[in-house]
Image (tube, helix red, strand yellow):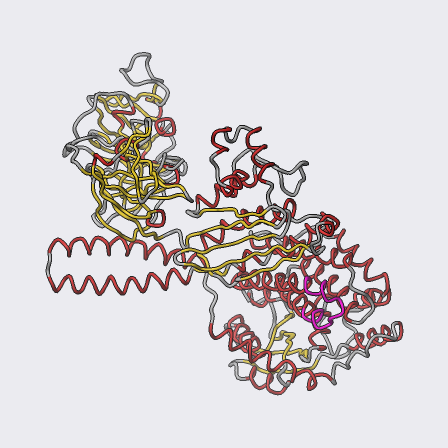
Amino acid sequence: MEVNQYLEVFIDESKEHLQAINENLLLLEKNPEDLAIVNEIFRSAHTLKGMSATMGYEDLANLTHKMENVLDAIRNHKLHVTADILDVVFASIDDLEAMVQDIAAGGTGKRDVSDIVDKLLKIENGETVNSTAAFAQTEASPSVSPSSTVKYDEFEYTVIQQSKEQGFNCLEVAVELRADCVLKAARVFMVFEVLEKCGEVIKSTPSTEELESEQFDERFVVTLITQEPAEDIESKVKKVSEVERVTVTEFIAQPLKTEEAEREVAAAAAPAPPMPTAIPEKTEKKEEPKQGKQQAVSNKTIRVNIERLDILMNLFEELVIDRGRLEQISGELNNPELNETVERMSRISGDLQTIILNMRMVPVETVFNRFPRMVRQLARDLNKKINLEIIGAETELDRTVIDEIGDPLVHLIRNAIDHGIETPEERKAKGKSEEGTVKLKAYHSGNHVFIEIEDDGAGINKEKVLHKALAKGVVTEEQAASMSDNQIYELILASGFSTADKISDISGRGVGLDVVKTTIESLGGSIGIEAAEGAGSVFLIQLPLTLSIISVMLVEVEKEKYAIPLSSIIETAIVKKEDVLNAHTQQVIDFRGKIVPLVFLERIFEVPKETQEDDFYSIVIVRKGDKMAGLVVDSFIGQQEVVLKSLGNYLSNVFAISGATILGDGQVALIVDCNALIK
Amino acid sequence: MSEITAPSMIKVIAFQLMDKEYAFPVHQVQGIEKLIHITRVPGTVPFIKGVINLRGVVTPIIDLRKRFGLPEKEYDEQTRIIIASSDDIEVGLVVDSANDVLDIPKSIIEPQPDIVGAVEAEYITGVAKLEKRLLILLNLERVFK
C-alpha cells in the first residue's frame, strides 16, 4: 500500500520491459510479418501500462496505452509494419524511457508527450478510426456495468479489458469490517496482503491513502485481477479477523462488449474478440507453463540494492587491510599455531573475495543492449545498410567498469559506422555486399576482459593518417619514418585528429577517439587498433575485471614503499651497473634483445637520498602497449593484493601516481601509474 | 555546533604555531589526531606533507608552518594533526599543539592590523583579543589553496 517500497521494483521492471520492447521492435523490423513478436511487445507494453497506472504515473500509462493501440492494430492486421510506424513507436519508447528515468531520479514522470501521442493517433486513425471512437465512448461512460459501484477511469478500464483477454478475471471484492473494529488500517492491510497473493490489485475504493488513514466507514471495495475463483477469494478474505462480510462479484465489462462488437462490424477482417466470460479456460493453459517458469527463475535470484553491495565491498576492503596486517604480524611472531590460523583465514577470505567480486559482476549486455537501437538509427540517418552482430554479451565485468565503458563504446561504434562502413553504392563498387557488418565481441582472458569492435568497412588509410598527423604536428617526419603500421593506426587516437573529410555530427569532431583512449586508460585498460585498408578495422579494448582490489608488486625506494600494478609488470630483473648503456642522455639496458630505457623512481619521485648505491640495480620491467621501461628501485618486497583508494579531491593529478593503498602496517603506500612513466 | 551557540558567539578551536595562537570555527573540525606515519607524495607543493591513513581513508596532510612560511620544527610529543574539512575536501593540518575550544563574541573580532607578523593576509579573516590571548582567525578555504 505504501507506494515507495514498490518504486524501486517498478523502476527496475519498467526498464526491463522497455528494453524488451526495444529488442523486440528491432526483431519485428526484420520480420514484419511475425505476429508472435508483436504479441511479445504487446505483453511488455501491457504490463508496463498496468504497473504505471497502479503506481499513479498517468502520463506514462497514457502514452503506453496509445502505443498499445497502434500495436493492437498491427496485431489485428489493420496496419502493416513500416519503418515510419516503427520510428514513431521507437520515439515513444524514448519518451517512456525518459519518463522512467525521471521517476528514478525522484521526479513525477510527467512529460509533454502530446506530439508523439498525436503521431500515434494519426497512425492509428489512418486505418482504424473506430477504435478511438470507441475509446471516446468508454471515457464518456466508464462505469455502465450494472453490478459495479466502482468507477473506473480509462486506464483501469483497459487494464481490466486486457487482463480478460489474457484469461484473468476481474473481481470486485467488497469487504465490510465489524463496526467495533479498532485497527481498521491494519485489517485493511491484511486484506490487501491476502488479495495481493491471489492476484493483482488494480484499484480500491476509497483510495489506498484514505484507507490507510482510516478515512472510511466499514466498507471498502477492492478491484482484483486474478485467476482464482470468486469463492476462494471470498473464503480467504473471510479468514482475516474482524471482517464482517465479504461479497465478491465479477466485474463484467458490459460496455466493453458492445464496443468490441462495434469494432468488429467496422473492421470485418479482425478476428472476433473472445467473450470475456468464455476465455479463462482457453488461455489459462497458455499462461500456466509460463508462470511456472517465472516462479522457478524468481526463486533463484533476488534483487539486491547496489548500495548494499557497495557497503559489503567497503567492509570487505577493510577486512583485506586487516588481513594484510595479520599476515605481517604472524610473520613477525612466527608462532606455528598463529601462522596456521592466519593462513586459513587468508584462504577463506580469499574465497569470500572471489564471491563478493562476482556478486558485483554485471554482464556487458547491460551496456551492449542499447547499441542495436543506436546502430539502426545511425544507419537510417546515414543511408547505410548495417548489420550489428553482438557476441559474448553474457561476459561479466565489474559494475564500476561497466558504468564507465558505455560512452567510449558508443564513440567507437559511431566511428565504425560513420568512417568505417561505406555507403551501399561504394560497397557494391568494391565488390562487397551492400550491407556492412559491425561486430561487437566481448570475452574473458586471464584477469582481463576484451571487447572488440570490428567492421568490414574501408579500414584505415595509412598514408592519409600519416599525412594528417604530420600536418597537425602530432608526429615529426623522423618519428613517422620508424613507426610500425599499428603505431600509425594508433595515431588516430591522438588528440586533435580527425580523418573524416567533412565533419559530421555523428563523429569526427576530432576529440572523440582521444577521449576514448583516456577513459580506457584511466580504467587501467588499453586500446589497440588493427586494420587492413579496404577490408575493415578492429579496435581492441582490454579492461581489468575489477577496479577495487588489484594485485601489486611492492617495492622499496630508499625508505618509501611504492606499489606497482602487476598488470603492467612483465618481469623483474637485477642488472649489474656496468651493463647499463648510455643512449645519449638516456640510460638503457639490453633486455632480451630489446633496448629498454631506465626510469629511476628515486629521481622521478625526488626521494631523499640516504643509502649508498651498490653495484646492482633492481629493475621492474613494465609495459604500456608495445613499449617498455625499466623502473629502477632499491629492493623488491613482494606481491600483494591491495585495495585501491583514491588520493581524494584535494590531491588530484599527482604525476605518475594513480592512487594509494593501505598496507598491513597501516601505512599508506602510493600506487605507481606506469602509463604516465612510459612515453 | 556553531548553530547551537548564540548568534553573537562563535566557537573556535585554538592551536599553537610558534609563539602565536591561531583559530578557526570548530564545526570545520573532524577530529584531532596524534602524529602518525605520513607518506610523502612526490610532485606536490612543498607544504603538502603527504598522506595518512585516517581509519581507512587516505587523507592529505598540510604542514601549517610550511604553509605560512614559518621556520620548520621537528615534530614532537605535542605535535597534533587537526582534521579539518571545508566543502568536500578533508585535510589534516599539522600544528605545534592543539590548545582548546573557545567561545568568542563576534563583537571582539577585529580586522587584521596592518602588521601581524610574517603571515600573509589572504587567509586571515580577523583577530580577536581574549583576555591576554590574541587569536588569529583563519579562513580554511584559502589555507587549502
Q: Is residue A118 left or right of residue A323?
A: right
Q: Main secondary structure of the magenta part?
A: helix
Spot occupied by residue A583 in the image (x, y as percentages of width and height): 33, 30
Spot occupied by residue A599 in the image (x, y as percentages of width and height): 31, 35
**Up/down of A96 relative to B90, above or below:** below
Task: Name the image quarter holding residue B131.
Answer: top left
**Up/down of A547 relative to A361, above or below:** above
Residue A658 in sight here: yes
Q: Quadrant of the N terminus of chain A?
A: bottom right
Q: Tell me if residue A180 is in the magenta stretch.
A: no
Camera-side residue: A627 or A125?
Answer: A627
Q: Quadrant of the C terminus of chain A?
A: top left
Camera-side residue: A455 or A5?
Answer: A455
Q: Residue furthest top?
A: B114
**Residue in the image at 69% along x and 75% along y:** A163
**Residue in the image at 62% along x and 87% along y:** A231
Q: How many marks?
A: 0
**Up/down of A460 relative to B63, above or below:** below
Q: Tell me if residue A33 is in the magenta stretch.
A: yes
Spot occupied by residue B84 in the image (x, y as percentages of width and height): 32, 36
Q: Which residues are magenta?
A: A26-40
Q: Is residue A213 left or right of residue A91?
A: left
Q: Is residue B117 left or right of residue A651?
A: left
Task: Name the image quarter holding residue A588.
Answer: top left
Spot occupied by residue A587 in the image (x, y as percentages of width and height): 30, 32
**Residue in the image at 34% along x and 17% along y:** B112
